[in-house]
Each structure stands twice: as C-alpha cells, then as structure tokens.
Image: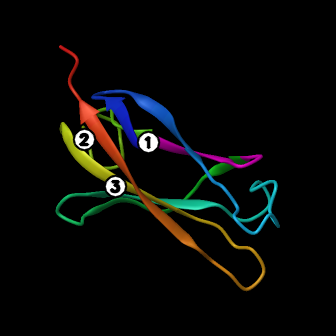
Amino acid sequence: MALRLTKGTKENLPVDITDRSGNISNLAGLLPKYDFVNDANVYIYTAAIAVGTDMRLNCFVDATAGGPSGLLPVGHYRLFVSFTSGAEVPRLGPVDVYIVDTN
C-alpha cells in the first residue's frame, strides 16, 4: 500500500491494521505511535502519537513550511506504526508515502 501526500499540506495518513490472532478489535487504548522516515533514514517524526479508531491508525503529517523540519521535499518516505498489546509492541511497516507536487 502506498499513500500520496501533496506537498505543502497537513493530513492524517490512515493505516489499517489486521489482527491475524483475532484478539484486538480497537487500537484506541493501545498507545499507538508512528515514525515517519525519509530515504536517508532521517526521522521526521519519532514515536509521534497516532489516533486509533477501531482498527485504523491516523498518523498526522505536516508537510507545510511550518512543519517539524520545514517544507518536506517531494520524494519517498516510510511510515512505521506501533502499539502496545500486553507484553507485545509490534512495529509494522513500512507504508510507502510519496510527497508529490501537483503543480
């Protein structure tokens, strides 16, 4: 799955999770977090709080001039999500994210 984010926007990037064991039905109370990394392995967001609703995590990415590292350039990024379920803390991903220029 690849997601597209237009340069200069602020958006929630959705990540749908499937629990193969059938034990989890809602991620909201499981301390969901995400990392957003560029191709040079520079972390734009590290352990940022994701919002869980049912089995979807929404990860907010600010690609505007006021973002965490200024305007994010057009290119490829990777999104990793994690949450805590008992003793387990899975880190899932990467989800490919492309920041594109629609001009």
Would residue 90 be found to the left or right of residue 42 on screen?
right
- Residue at horizontal 45 percent and vertical 61 percent from the top: 93
Is the image coloured rainbow, by chain, by secondary structure, or in one colour?
rainbow
Would residue 65 be found to the left or right of residue 58 on screen?
left
The residue at which mark 2 appears reads as: 72
* Comparing labels 3 and 1, the label whose residue is closer to the camera: 3
The amino acid at mark 1 is Val
Q: Position of residue 20 (x, y in %)?
A: 69, 64
Magenta stretch: give its range. 53-60
The residue at which mark 3 appears reads as: 78
Marked residue nearer the N-terminal end (2 or 1)? 1
Residue 27 lies in the magenta-colored region: no
Is residue 70 positioned above or below 20 on the image?
A: above
Indicate the quadrant where residue 26 lies: bottom right
Secondary element under disc 2, as helix, strand or loop, is: loop
Residue 55 lies in the magenta-colored region: yes
Report the magenta stretch's main SS: strand
Q: Between marks 2 and 3, how big is the CA–CA gap? A: 13 Å
Question: Do the numbered discs 2 and 1 sit on residues whose CB atoms are within 8 Å?
Answer: yes
The amino acid at mark 2 is Leu
Q: Position of residue 90 (x, y in %)?
A: 59, 74
Marked residue nearer the N-terminal end (3 or 1)? 1
The residue at which mark 1 appears reads as: 61
